[in-house]
Image (cartoon, coloured by chain):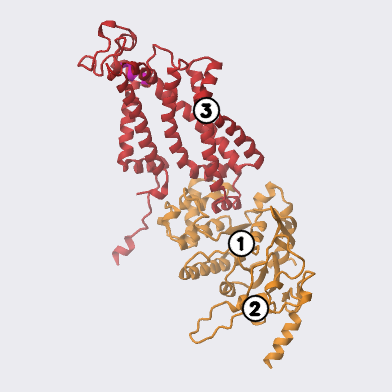
Amino acid sequence: MNFMTTTTVKRRKKKSQFVMVWERLKQNRLAVAGLVILSIIVLAAVFANLLFDYEAMAVRQNASIRLNPPSSEHWLGTDEVGRDILARIVFGARVSLPVAFATILIAAVIGGLLGAIAGYGSRTADNVIMRIMDMFLAIPSTLLAIAIVATLGSSIRNLLIAIAVSNIPPFARIIRSSVITIRNEEFIEAAQAIGASDKRIIFKHILPNAMAPMIVQATMCIAGSVLSIASLSFLGLGIQPPTPEWGSMLSNGRQYIRVAWWVCTFPGIAIMLTILSLNLLGDGLRDALDPKLKN
Amino acid sequence: MADNILEVKHLKKYFKTNRGTLHAVDDVNFSIRKGETLGLVGESGCGKSTIGRLILGLHSATSGEILFNGQDICRMDAQQMHSMRRQMQIIFQDPFSSLNPRMSISEIIGEPLIIHKIVSSRAELDKRVLELMDVVGLSQRLENSYPHELDGGRRQRVGIARALSLTPQFIMCDEPVSSLDVSIQAQVLNLLKDLQAEFGLTYLFITHDLSVVKYFSDKIAVMYLGQLVETADSDELFRNTLHPYSQALLSAIPEPRAHHKMQRVKLTGELTSPINPEPGCRFAKRCLYAAPYCTGQDPVLQDFGGNHFCACFRAEELREEAAGAAE
């Protein structure tokens, strides 16, 4: 019969990992919402110079318009020294977001590697690494960050180091525990049987399977990192005024909450939206990276 | 013998535990000839999988020799072991956990080829992977699927294809069908048989299911608590079972006849602990025929003619008794 001869084996088209993850992510509405919000915040931060005049709107003090409520001129009102809150939020994103992302990236890479070595390596390596991590965990992370910034001096670089260091131990612990679970799976033995090197086993077999909790942890830690930057700034150890920063705006506005709710509300909403979008995106990414949850 | 592909001599593997030394494999000797299948039978925890892992170098032996084509695996460095792995492969029991869930079927089958640098280009890799999938009866459309999208039988075929990818001489099958449906078991066993005929493979077939080995093996070795208790050619073992433990195992095979009344040898008592075992026959505590002299010293494998070995103090006696009863 004719159709028999023309039938060819239908092979599923090979797609790159990135395309596949993207396609799965697209189907998750909440994740897309998170991505959209985050993109708006990031774009606003990137093009802040085109939107507002930094000097005139975000830094220069103008007592005649202090604590003005939201109006057509100042959409989100002005603060206690007459600076435009919207402009300061947009410029604040330029500080909070890159620092938060950078700290978590550093913490995740270092913590992930340490955790993988502790989980896969010898018992001695495990003990040494994890006891050091325990020591760090025993110190409250804010206190640790304060100590680091206070010793090194307050600058964005030192702030970054401080927050990254205090975030390493949770990553190391999470990765270690998932590595230990996965190490005992039969497919690791299978990989050893075909002669895979330890490096290949860690990077190709263990880490991809240990990613899910790490991604969730990372999105939550970015949120925590935004808050850490804010609290350190509040204590005068982070971003120095007059550079706009969400956390310091929030804490400054705290004093005026009865007479001018907008001063601390809008930076708070900015922090909340950023964290919310990151969490939504993180959840979506975790699902999209897992081929088992496809479709 | 020159045609022995694998010889295991005085192999021991002890694990240290908090309660003492666990004798997982205790002085085991056997050999497999090229192209043959040895069925290694025993109940859970008797050390049969440990033997498999030792042969593949996934565990290191406490003492003893494993000669593969005359070379001792226990004394190889990492480099030699790496090239040795091309010669011997393993098929795992559980096709659900032995495949990396994050890798596609073609990646799983192709990985050994990449590790051992057997293929030089992407196109060659794809071609070889498709060939292997064809050999084990997997449709090409599954190439980019993931393990969780396949059923147990297909996954086990992926595991077989992965083992075959390095064109090994020897494959260790660690209960390859015991987690599959009965209908699929037959398919996979037939596939393994066909592959053996096609590629001249040698199998070490580890299982607890005697009805499977009966069909599959040339020789059978029965194991109890880390020791071999009886080895014989497959037919011989089924016809002329000597060791009381083997008899109990054989009597547990269901007969596919409606009115056949099974005469089961029921074992009572718990499995003796493999931790710090006392000298003497380890089966004695559950054995129906145990005599006082069964404990105190270890039984050795005695030759009963025709390649039939049995480690039982009373084997001779019991055989005569049985012969007397039959008359």
> Residue A90 appears in which quarter of the rendering?
top left
**Which of B16/B83 is in front?**
B16
Q: Position of residue A248 (x, y in %)?
A: 39, 18
> Residue B247 appears in which quarter of the rendering?
bottom right
Which residue position holds label 1? B172
Marking on residue B191: none
- The amino acid pointed to by label 1 is Met
Residue at 31 percent across and 43 percent down: it is: A27
Q: Quadrant of the N terminus of chain B?
A: bottom right
Which residue position holds label 3? A140
Task: Identify the subunit bearing mark 3.
Answer: A
Residue at 56 percent across and 38 percent down: it is: A115
What crowding class fits label 3: few (fewer than 14 Cα within 10 Å), some (14-19), or many (20 or more)? few
> Which residues are drawn in magenta?
A87-92
The relative height of residue A153 versus residue B38 in the rendered view (above or below) is above
Q: Nearer the viewer, mark 2 or mark 3?
A: 3
Q: CA distance from mark 2 to mark 1?
A: 26 Å
Which secondary structure, mark 2? helix
Which residue position holds label 2? B247
**Which of B197/A116 is in front?**
A116
Q: Is residue A5 left or right of residue A130?
A: left
Q: Does mark 3 fall on the same chain as mark 2?
A: no
Q: Position of residue B149 (x, y in %)?
A: 41, 55
- The amino acid pointed to by label 3 is Pro
The relative height of residue B308 versus residue A7 in the rendered view (above or below) is below
Give the drawing colour for chain A: red
